[in-house]
Image: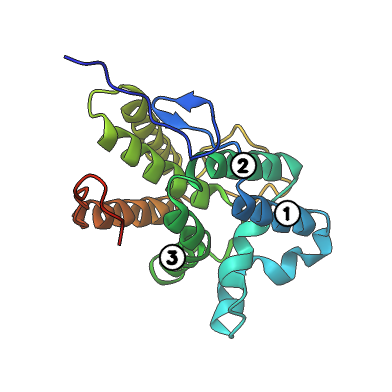
Amino acid sequence: MKPEKGIKPPTGSSGLQVSGLGFQVSPPWTFLAAAAVALVIQLNPAWRPALLYDRAAVAAGEWWRVWTGHFVHFGWPHFVADTGLLVILGWLLEARHPVFSRVGLVALPAFITAALYWFDPAMLLYGGLSAVNLGLLLFLALQGWQRNWTDWFWPAVLVIYVGEVIFESAQGGRGGGMIRFDDPAVRVATSAHLASAAYALIAWLLGMSRPTKKPGPAGSAPH
């Protein structure tokens, strides 16, 4: 049996490998732009009340909160953890899955917010990129596992993901104690994490259902 070949990084670049997945060398500009937005908001704490997901305000027509709420963080530790992971995921995702990555940065926050609005009416306020990150991470793990079903790394990521959600649920949404928020009333939004998981699973299943293009005859030009 021939050993599995490593996955090549994008043309014209080289990169580190994480269980068959390469870090792109060129910066993930879309993710860096999103991180910059989060940084500007973090540097202006007076903006928080106008940008947070606020159920009553969204119902009153303040639709920008559907997206901006995800870029608001409850303190610098929360910001560093969420935004740092977002940038790392961008390095892993944007070159390999550009459509999913760029569409996801717009559609995933809206999907999560819609789930909170319709299925978790008790969630009056929400902020942070953690749910977006978990959706991106789950999609990445599913893609990695699909490429090599015998690879232990990606199933381990999935187990950790599921374990975290179960732990949060068992704690009544008060898990995730590694990060200290600047508001003691803030709790981990397990429902947002479940919504992000649903989005990632739908995107992955849709990708699997697409027919794979067969390579044409040698020397033929691509269409």
From the viewer's perspective, tell me whether residue 46 is left or right of residue 32. Answer: right
Residue pictured at 40% horizontal, 36% vertical: 161
Q: At label 3, which amino acid type do we have? A: Phe
Q: Nearest to the eye among marks 3 and 1: give it.
A: 1
Residue denoted by label 1: 36
Q: Secondary structure under badge 2?
A: loop
Question: Which residue is situated farthest in the front direction here?
Answer: 219
Contact, CB < 8 Å: mark 2 with mark 3? no
Residue denoted by label 2: 26
Circle 1 residues within 10 Å: few <14, some 14–19, many ≥20: some
Q: Nearest to the eye among marks 1 and 2: give it.
A: 2
The label on residue 111 is 3
Q: Secondary structure under badge 1?
A: helix
Q: CA distance from mark 3 to mark 1?
A: 22 Å
Instruction: Classify the position of the N terminus by image quarter.
Output: top left
Does residue 192 appear in the picture of this structure?
Answer: no
Contact, CB < 8 Å: mark 3 with mark 1? no
Q: At label 1, which amino acid type do we have? A: Ala
Q: At label 2, which amino acid type do we have? A: Ser
Q: Earlier in the sequence, mark 1 or mark 2?
A: 2
Q: Is residue 223 above or below residue 218?
A: below
Residue 76, image quadrant: top right
Contact, CB < 8 Å: mark 1 with mark 2? no
Instruction: Classify the position of the C terminus by image quarter.
Output: bottom left
